[in-house]
Amino acid sequence: MAEIAPARLADLTTLRTGAAPERMLDATTTDELVESLRDTWSRGDEWFVLGGGSNLFVGDEPFEGTVIRVLTTGIERLPSPHPGRVRLRVQAGHNWDDLVAYTVAHGLAGIEAMSGIPGTVGAAPVQNVGAYGQEIQETLVEVDLIDESTGEVQTVPASELGLGFRTSVLKHHYGGAPIRRAVILSVTLDLAEVGEAGRPIGGEQLRRALGISAGERVSLADVRERIRATRAAKGMLLNPDDPDTTSAGSFFQNLIVPETVAAQLPPECPRWPVEPDQDAATVIPLESFDGYVPPARTTRPDVKVSAAWLIENSGIRKGFRLPRSRAGISTKHALALTNRGGATAGELAELARYIQARVHSEFGLLLQPEPVLVGVEL
């Protein structure tokens, strides 16, 4: 554990906001990370961990607590119990895109469509990151974490993380606390060994993004290259020379709404069904079982609605700025709020509230922020 002179969070986050906190610790090994967290918790400090700073929106006032920078790195290759697969245990501070590059270089499939996503590996399960039809929950086996309530290190299977659309039991949602306050130390993934040869792409969403037809064979390297190019064209690939990337990525989440609500939106609004769990089990206690099994309930699926479409069709275009503001919508992607140079958190929050109000006024839906907000109110 190394206590360092606190750095401005504006220099450590991709939205470029935030003053220096009261206290800052660097953890470069798992032991240092565990020690830093236990020490901070024993002091009773307010705290948060900082990885790549790409999903964080920090307020203008100094954070009165401890910020722990997770700088652990490393990839360990492990056997998988499944033929033709390999497991990787990756340290929480490892750069996510560097991990994807490693898997592609070694012919391991399962996360290649998530190329170019900023941030660290430890943050990926918290958000259940995904892109172009892939999500980390499809390959995640387990995580090692340390729980604030006990200070103990545990190995937790993916099934206990409550993984859903951009959420988990570890995520701090706006307006609420996480169900479980814990910090991920390492992540274990189970990936398919496919080598360098091309292979058919199963997911329709990924095929559309790659511009290929069903049955067309594409190598992992080609998938990665095309996805990174697509993200760059949308301003979603970090680039110091592109002000559209000075953002937290998609600032607002796509909405999950009942089918009846989606039906009231204009037909041209993009939407995708969220399939219900077809394998959900009905549990009947043995002592009360009388031979009757109730019929399965049929439910209409919820629908995912495009937040970007709602924003643009509420009258807010790419590149929009409020008067005299240094915050603006990306010129490439309506979902990205960007710091155009020296913007305060207050300016970005003002723009976010304006967007929420316009969408709510036009469509009756309230957009929710995707980044973790620290010292900021919307």
Image: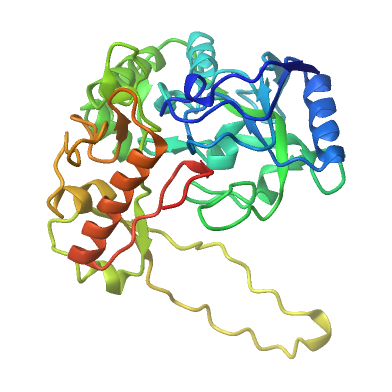
The residue that appears at 84% across and 21% down in the rendered structure is 31
Work out whether 365 lies above or below 75. below
The residue that appears at 48% across and 27% down in the rendered structure is 111
Q: Who is closer to the viewer here, 174 or 20? A: 20
Count of labels in the image: 0
- By what rule are the colours in the image chosen? rainbow
Left or right: 53 as drawn, with respect to 227: right
Left or right: 357 as drawn, with respect to 346: left
Residue 55 percent across, percent down from the top left: 48, 34
The residue that appears at 62% across and 29% down in the rendered structure is 21
Work out whether 47 lies above or below 116. below
The residue that appears at 12% across and 51% down in the rendered structure is 315
- Is residue 42 visible in the rendered structure shown here? yes
- Quarter of the rendering occupied by the N terminus: top right
**Quarter where residue 14 is shown:** top left
Q: Who is closer to the viewer here, 358 or 88? A: 358
Work out whether 182 lies above or below 112. below
Residue 101 percent across, percent down from the top left: 48, 13
Left or right: 242 as drawn, with respect to 374: left
Left or right: 356 as drawn, with respect to 149: left
Residue 303 percent across, percent down from the top left: 33, 61
Residue 363 percent across, percent down from the top left: 21, 65
- Is residue 88 visible in the rendered structure shown here? no
Q: Who is closer to the viewer here, 141 or 120? A: 120
